[in-house]
Amino acid sequence: MNIKDYNFDGKKAIVRVDFNVPIQDGKITDMTRINGAAPTLKLILEKGGSLIIMSHMGKPKGKKKPELSLSQIVDAVSQTLGVPVKFAPDCADASEAAAALKKGEVLLLENLRYYPEEEGKPVGIEKDDPAYEDAKKEMKARQKDFAKKLASYADCYVMDAFGTAHRKHASTAVIADYFDADNKMLGLLMEKEVQAVDNVLSNIKRPFVAIMGGSKVSSKIGIIENLLGKVDKLILCGGMTYTFSKAHGGEIGNSIVELDKLDVALNVEKMAKENGVELVLGTDSICGDSFSNDAKQLVCPSNAIPEGWEGLDAGPETQKAFAAAIKGAKTILWNGPAGVFEFDNFCAGSRAVGNAVAEATAEGAFSLIGGGDSVACVNKFGLADKVSYISTGGGALLEAIEGKVLPGVAAIKG
């Protein structure tokens, strides 16, 4: 069912959103996720429905932690939607509050992850314990009961939390089993996210350039291998640079490195060559004598970093090479910064990448930015309105790019 065609009049909709927002001193520091879900929530209210909103916050691991309570965001959600939002302090005991909802009213449920049933993982038992499999079966049964309880609050289900779509949780996938095909649907944000991924992977306009940053090759290897069969150019930056340098016998000082992944780095280079992909790696680095914004700086080759120094950003020559590789691209995927962009003195590499992506977008490229750090980069450099699409999902986006089926999407679309 398409959300735009559904008749919400007089119906209660339970909507899974991703309101896992950063909070400091009781204040939300980034409204991106709440603003992202607003169009779906407002559409349901405009069409005469009432809303039951559910989300997780943080990782309470089945414990009720006040600092992770969604009660802290009630006012912000009320302001965003323009209607007062009621709050249910127990997501598994909200039948009466849900039943009492009138047309146009909104109820926000407490943090779903206060219950271990949401994630469906056994608590307090290790995987190597002989009793683990039995505990897992029991938890899966409890997860179904939990999902059934949540489903009982509403007439229809809307999945609009792309950030958790890669998890088969009670509220993101299992709950869909309790609604027929005519009464479950993706929200507007989910539709946009799925379309954006599709644009990058299925509707490729060439040249296609992917920029993969971050500290570890190991966390990105599945995505890198999948992309090597699709892209024309692959820029690898950030901490990964030094694993590649080390694999060729380079001196990398105190730079971050995965010594057990040197063969993986060499294999990536081999696969790139076999696939005719231009692999672009950093040749110089801006180094610091400590991991600090105030560290002394030294520019040197990425394979000749002195002892006592560590690579913290892409060097001037690398910045030029990255910008040149991005220029003229028609499809761009950016995930992960080019350095420790949180430090103002070591953010030049990430800024250069961001500016190059923005320029290519202005010249007609489709640019998809995903992953928390890349989104933070784009926001820090004031480029949010100069790229095509900013994804709200980190892990979900990466798994979709890796070619994996997302349970949260499959639960709706089959």
Image (spheres, helix red, strand yellow):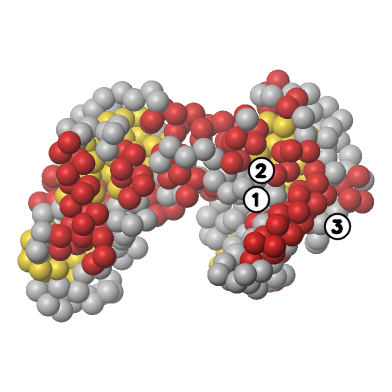
**Residue identifier under label 1:** 169
Image point (21%, 54%), residue name? 265
Q: Secondary structure at mark 1?
A: loop
How many marks do you count on the picture?
3
Residue closest to the eye, 95 or 174: 174
- From mark 2 to mark 1, how far is it between C-alphas? 6 Å
Occupied quadrant, residue 410: top right
Question: In the rendering, at what x and y percent does residue 80 appear?
Answer: 66, 45
Q: Secondary structure at mark 2?
A: loop
**Residue identifier under label 2:** 173
Question: In the rendering, at what x and y percent does residue 331 appear?
Answer: 31, 30
Question: In the rendering, at what x and y percent does residue 66 appear?
Answer: 70, 71
Residue closest to the eye, 316 or 408: 408
What amino acid is labelled 1 in the image?
His
Q: Relative to 41, is 192 on the left or the right?
A: left
Image point (14%, 68%), residue name? 252
What amino acid is labelled 3 in the image?
Asp
In the rendered structure, find residue 324 and report the number of the disc placed on it: none
**Residue identifier under label 3:** 93
Residue reaching furthest to the front: 130
Image point (65%, 33%), residue name? 412
Tag 3: Cα neighbours inside 10 Å, few (<14), some, or many (≥20)? Answer: some
Tag 2 near tag 3, CB within 8 Å:
no
Of the image marks 3 and 1, the number of the one nearer the N terminus: 3
What amino acid is labelled 2 in the image?
Ala
Dividing the image into 4 quarters, which one contains the N terminus?
top right
Dividing the image into 4 quarters, which one contains the C terminus?
top right
